[in-house]
Amino acid sequence: MARAQYGAQAVVGLRGSLPNPFPRTIGPNAGKYLQEVIDSGLTCDMVGRFEKAFAQELGVKHCIATPGCTPALAVLAAAFGFAPGDEIIVSPITDYGTVQGLIRENYIPVFPDTAPGTVNMSAETIAPCISDRTRAILAVHKTGLVCDMDPINELAARHGIIVYEDACQAVFSRYKGRYAGTLALAAGFSFDSEKTLGSDVGGCVTTSDDGLAERLRFIGHSRGGEMIPHFGRAHTAPGYAHRMTQSTAAITLAQLEIIKPQVEKRDHMIRLLTRLLGQIPGIVPLPIPEYVEVYSCWMAGFSIAPGVFKCSGEQFADQLAKAGVSGAGQGKYYLMPAALSFLQEKAAKKVYPYSQPPASRSYHYSADSCPNARDFLEHFIRWSTFCEKYEEDHCELAAQLVAEVAERNRA
């Protein structure tokens, strides 16, 4: 069995002509903040300092720090307290971390299709999936492209449904003057080493809802434990100890201090790269909607037009990696209805929570259930080594390498 690798381990041995995020650029105050943690004998509140700083930069009331993005979204799922068999609508193109918490809470993920030609779902694709068991919509801003949130929020309001965000790849992306992570009730973020705001690891939940923030700390940090006089801790809810460490908070705080210029540079470079790729016949860059004012791009990508090339998307990506675009490949595994084989089996066998009750109907997960997303990923090529180290000449070189591979493979 070959286990999945993450962070720096996932890119060990990659070779190419373009920048690699590792070694990461580290904020100059990281050593100072780590020393404070050590000198204080672990008594300084570095986590609290980070939470306050991130909330202030984002413009929200609360930041609840966690050890990673998967725990952040798991704590959110638990804090909502929905019933087993309740449905959460979530983008079909995402990562397992988005849905892990839903599955552990015995909610049922429902995957709408993506909007044609893109990685994100839309209000139009979500609407047919709403049922009387729908409790929330989890909008994933894949690659850093923000979903068109106003129509999604309007749709949810009509049905009395919660909306929250997976902003793990979209830190400081800006939508109509507002940051990703401030566009709904709450949001989860990632500070894992490979992400845009890359620390050693880490994540957080943000919200401006006081009641939800307290619930998140109770469930996520205090393990659902209350202090009872003359007794001590009584666990009145199943909870977690998903607390960020002081050392992670120190590094992440230092990274926060340098992130804004890096995001602005990523936005400039991905827009340049998009223009250059768009000039190559048969190459369709990932579209950047007008409502995305700042694209905090974590992953560059494009599609090859069907019928234009004599090779598959996988073959094109392999040739591109060998030509010098390190990390070039496909992301078919991002299609959750196809990637979650254990969920396919549970749904097919009607194993709890797919038994009736608590489920209200039968469910089926496969690539064919989201044909837009399936077909998009069949032709989509991306590299997750896109980073703030890119300069204009790197964008020109990347486009040149794509053009050379394209010319070799024209039908």
Image (cartoon, rainbow, N blue to C red):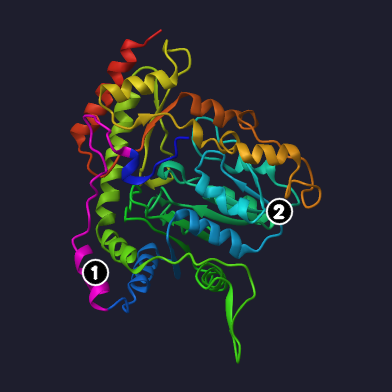
Front-lying residue, 146 or 292: 146
Locate residue 193, reporting x and y percent. 33, 51
Q: Which residue is mark 2?
A: 86
Foreground residue among 8 and 29: 8
Assess whether residue 87 is covered by the magenta stretch: no
Which stretch did the figure color magenta? 11-40
Image quarter in which the C terminus is found: top left
Residue at 47% across, 12% down? 307
- Say whether residue 18 is magenta: yes
**Upstream in sequence: badge 2 or badge 1:** 1
Residue 277 spot, x, y in % from top left: 32, 26
Determine the residue positioned at 65% across, 32% down.
369
> CA–CA distance between discs 2 and 1?
43 Å
Magenta part mainly helix, strand or loop? loop
Q: Residues within 10 Å of mark 2 (few under 14, many from 20)?
A: many
Q: Position of residue 235 (x, y in %)?
A: 62, 75
Determine which quarter of the picture holds residue 75.
bottom right
Residue ranking furthest to the right: 356
